[in-house]
Image: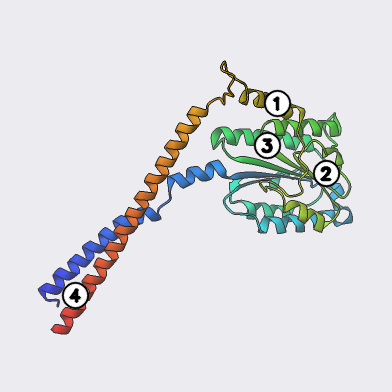
């Protein structure tokens, strides 16, 4: 049975704990600003994997599985993944947050069979990306990885159709990594955003390590004629002179105002965070003080 002093002390302790939880728990909950930031900075990967019958020769399917498995096992978390084999629709994976493990499982279940309908699958991928941009977020960076060991077999324009579709993807601001496996697929060179050849598991694994990098060290960047025209028009607009002969940068005032507002908001968030930390510290000190009072009162009794 507690005496009145102990009872009052324990009551104060309970109130202090409730205040501490009310003050500190909001900081532990999901931050909507962080969620918004992640939606604008994340990367969505689409893997178009050649599972045609030719992948069965020379253990090409085994080498590809090993290389992709290693790459996916070390993938950075927080991104979105989709898997699209050329033939086996049963292994298709729609866009999945942190879905690298699910993609790896489907890669390991892939078996070579059928033709090489690359154009058809790339067109499907483009529709899926456009749908995601419309329904989920338009801010993601989209990267499409195309692995193939042969020529297009279904589209009437054959490899030319693949080249045209790849350029269409790039025009839609989708980075395309074209991988020519075991000496086949060189028609992607000069059309994909990034292109490399791989003749075994080691070369494929090394090339995959550069996928998604902001600026790959040894990437061979290819600029389409459409992109070149856009860059030229943008440069003319940016450095056009006004009536006084000065270089006028369009939208500069709005950018400065927006930057000032962002910095102001960041400063406010920083001050709020510091205040929450101070409140938590004061609450902890108060709890220790109250516990000390309980212990000392018991010793006196």
The image's mark for residue 293 is 4
**Residue 35 visible in this rendered orientation of the protein:** yes
Sequence-earlier tag: 4 or 3: 3
Whether tag 1 and tag 4 are in contact, CB under 8 A, the answer is no
Compared with 236, 94 (above or below) is below
Q: Which residue is drawn at 32% across and 53% down?
A: 275
Using the numbered discs, state the Cα–Cα distance from disc 2 to disc 4 in whole angstroms: 79 Å
State which mark lies toward you, 1 or 2: 1
Sequence-earlier tag: 1 or 4: 1
Q: Which residue is drawn at 72% across and 29% down?
A: 227
Whether tag 2 and tag 3 are in contact, CB under 8 A, the answer is no
10 Å crowding of disc 3: few (<14), some (14-19), many (20+): many
The image's mark for residue 232 is 1
Q: Residue at x 67, y 48 (%)?
A: 213
Residue nearest the viewer, comparing 33 with 148:
33
The image's mark for residue 174 is 3
Whether tag 4 and tag 3 are in contact, CB under 8 A, the answer is no
Q: Residue at x 79, y 47 (%)?
A: 51
Q: Where is residue 59 in the image (x, y as percent from the top left)?
A: 85, 57
Using the numbered discs, state the Cα–Cα distance from disc 3 to disc 1 in whole angstroms: 20 Å
- Residue under label 2: 114
10 Å crowding of disc 2: few (<14), some (14-19), many (20+): some
State which mark lies toward you, 2 or 4: 4
Sequence-earlier tag: 1 or 2: 2
Sequence-earlier tag: 2 or 3: 2
Using the numbered discs, state the Cα–Cα distance from disc 1 to disc 2 in whole angstroms: 44 Å
Residue nearest the viewer, comparing 266 with 186:
266
Using the numbered discs, state the Cα–Cα distance from disc 2 to disc 3 in whole angstroms: 27 Å
Q: Where is residue 89 in the image (x, y as percent from the top left)?
A: 71, 43
């Amino acid at each position: 049975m507690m005496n009145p002093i102990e009872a009052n002390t324990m009551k104060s302790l309970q109130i202090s704990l409730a205040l501490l939880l009310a003050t500190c728990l909001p900081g532990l909950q999901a931050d909507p600003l962080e969620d918004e930031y992640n939606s604008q900075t994340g990367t969505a990967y689409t893997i178009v994997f050649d599972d045609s019958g030719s992948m069965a020769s020379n253990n090409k399917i085994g080498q590809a599985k090993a290389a992709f498995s290693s790459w996916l096992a070390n993938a950075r978390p927080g991104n979105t993944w989709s898997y699209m084999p050329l033939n086996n629709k049963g292994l298709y994976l729609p866009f999945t947050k942190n879905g690298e493990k699910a993609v790896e499982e489907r890669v390991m279940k892939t078996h070579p069979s059928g033709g090489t309908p690359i154009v058809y699958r790339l067109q499907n991928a483009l529709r899926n990306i456009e749908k995601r941009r419309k329904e989920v977020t338009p801010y993601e960076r989209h990267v499409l990885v195309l692995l193939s060991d042969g020529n297009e077999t279904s589209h009437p324009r054959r490899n030319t159709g693949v080249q045209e579709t790849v350029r269409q993807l790039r025009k839609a601001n989708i980075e395309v990594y074209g991988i020519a496996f075991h000496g086949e697929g060189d028609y992607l060179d000069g059309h994909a955003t990034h292109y490399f050849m791989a003749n075994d598991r080691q070369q494929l694994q090394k090339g995959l390590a550069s996928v998604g990098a902001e600026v790959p060290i040894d990437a061979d960047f290819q600029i389409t004629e459409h992109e070149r025209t856009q860059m030229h028009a943008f440069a003319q607009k940016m450095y056009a002179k006004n009536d006084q002969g000065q270089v006028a940068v369009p939208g500069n005032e709005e950018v400065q105002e927006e930057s000032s507002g962002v910095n102001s908001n960041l400063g406010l968030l920083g001050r709020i965070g510091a205040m929450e930390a101070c409140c938590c510290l004061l609450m902890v000190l108060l709890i220790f003080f109250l516990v000390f009072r309980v212990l000392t009162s018991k010793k006196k009794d």
